[in-house]
Image (tube, helix red, strand yellow):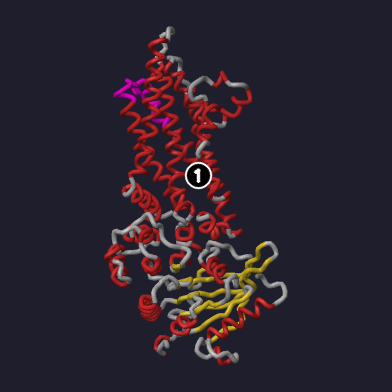
Amino acid sequence: MPSPALHPSPLPVPALQVSALCKQYAGVRAVDEVNFSVAHGEIVGLLGPNGAGKTTTINMILGVLAPTSGSIAIEGLDVGSQRRDALARTNFAAVYATLPGNLTVLENLRVFGLIYGVRNLGSRIAELMEQFDLLRFRDTRCGVLSSGEQTRVSLAKALLNRPSLLLLDEPTASLDPSTAKTVRERIREMASRERCGILWTSHNMYEVEAVCDRVLFVSQGRILLEGDPRSLPQQHGATNLEDLFIRIARERLSEPGAGP
Amino acid sequence: MKLRPILAIALRQFYLMRGSPTRILPMFAWVAIDIVLWGFITRYLNSVGTGGIDFVPRLLGAVLFWDFFTRVMQGVTMAFFEDVWSHNFLNIFATPLSIAEYVSGLVLTSVCTSLLGLIVMLVLSTSVFGLQFVALGVWLIPYLLVLFLFGIALGIIAAGMVLRLGPASEWLVWPIPALLSPFAGVFYPLATLPAWMQGVAKVLPPSYVFEGMRALLSGEPHDVRPLLWGLGIALVQILLAAWGFRQIYRHAVRTGLLARYSAESSS
């Protein structure tokens, strides 16, 4: 359970502000009028069944997918019109975006550190390698690392620029329970220490309950529920978060016109 | 534009080459093979020719120029393909890096790799086959510049084409220099070509280089205007190529192509 001290304190500009966000593909609304914010130091879980629109939302926040309408602001900077400044304050790690396997851990971190304009890059890399237990893989090509080790490299890359907003798409999916626990703790500490807002997607409801201050349940591109992951299930007559997740996913499937 | 992100893109290519002889070898091997092959062909032609024409600068020089242009173009496309092959688009384009910085990084990579190839070709052609580039004098520099600019323009166009059509369209890129060479008049005067091919040659900057080179070697008075025209066309083509790449990138962001690219490139 996160301690009350780790709960966000209100700052005038949130780390992330998503307003009336829509993405439409050939008549299908992948994301439909989504509104939410992530405060500095807050960890928000973005939950939902496959195809709910979570990754589409993350891609729009990262500026690699243009919204059909709506706006995204990172620390008040619009991703559409102030892309460079907005993305300089952001970073991400996702299971589907591993770093190039033909570069070593050190080479990858150097290249991305330069792209993000990280100051004192050498010492920042050394610090992150230590933090994610990567020192022994310093000169190992990422492609030969295990999926768990690659995830740790991706997380180190994601923290290189001390982002104000961190997007984590199933960051612990490839990690063993022990490493996953350590990584979760470190990310929580980092969110608290550096006042970094985090948007976290996961299908592991235990993890979400342990890490997130707030969760957003997404289905068919819309936010259906929002609240504290520890009290939300009871509020909606579910025994736990997983039970609530399953119910929402099945309701979606039973709706007319829902995909397979 | 910031320098550090541009250097980062070029540094990535340096790291790749440093750790992979299979990436370094093609920078030398193909051009060396071409020079050796054409070097012996020109020697043979010189021995059987009766008109007193020296084929070494005409043919071997033309091969060297054309290979240089090809290396420049492939320097850009190969650097781009590395990101395609390693499914790196999401990592790269979700950063503060601008498109201009990314393309500049590709160009910087190409400058380094093509210079390396050029040095090998010059050493081999002069030391083994006696090619005297001093015969071209100061014209050598603008000739190489025009070929370099055209190679960059074509490299950017080819990268944009792969971004737009998907990773499978990579095979369309490799034959581009071979497709253009008949129109550019690499080995023969443009007057040899039918009128419609001469029309195409007019928009190909290398055609001005090869015409000028032949005129110079034949001792004819060298008119600088066609070369300036070629230089101007190459500069316009670079601007158009950069604009086109930006448009394709924007289309990819709008339609979700960029976000899907990683998944598609692994299929």
Residue B41 placement (x, y as % from top left): 40, 19
Residue farthest right in this picture: A256
Rendering quarter of residue B25: top left
Q: Which residue is mark 1?
A: B156
Judge whether A198 appears above or below A161 on screen: below
Magenta-colored stretch includes residue B126: yes
Write the residue at 30% across / 67% down: A134
Q: Main secondary structure of the magenta part?
A: helix
Asked if residue B139 is positioned above or below residue B71 in the image, the reply reads above
In this view, the residue farthest toward the top is: B50
Residue A158 makes an appearance in the image: yes
Residue bounds of the magenta highlight: B125-144
In the figure, is residue A159 to the left or right of B87? left
- Disc 1 is attached to a residue of which chain? B
Few, some or many residues within 10 Å of mark 1 (<14, 14–19, 20+): many
Amino acid type, label 1: Ile
Q: Quadrant of the N terminus of chain A?
A: bottom left
For label 1, the SS is helix
Q: Position of residue B86 (x, y in %)?
A: 44, 54
With respect to residue A134, does B4 lie above or below?
A: above
Residue B99: x and y in percent read 49, 53
In depth, the one of A98 and B213 nearer the eye is A98
Q: Report which quarter residue A156 is drawn in.
A: bottom left
Rendered position, A183 above or below A114: below
Residue in view at x 30 percent, y 23 percent: B128
Query: At 58% across and 92% down in the image, what residue appears?
Result: A235
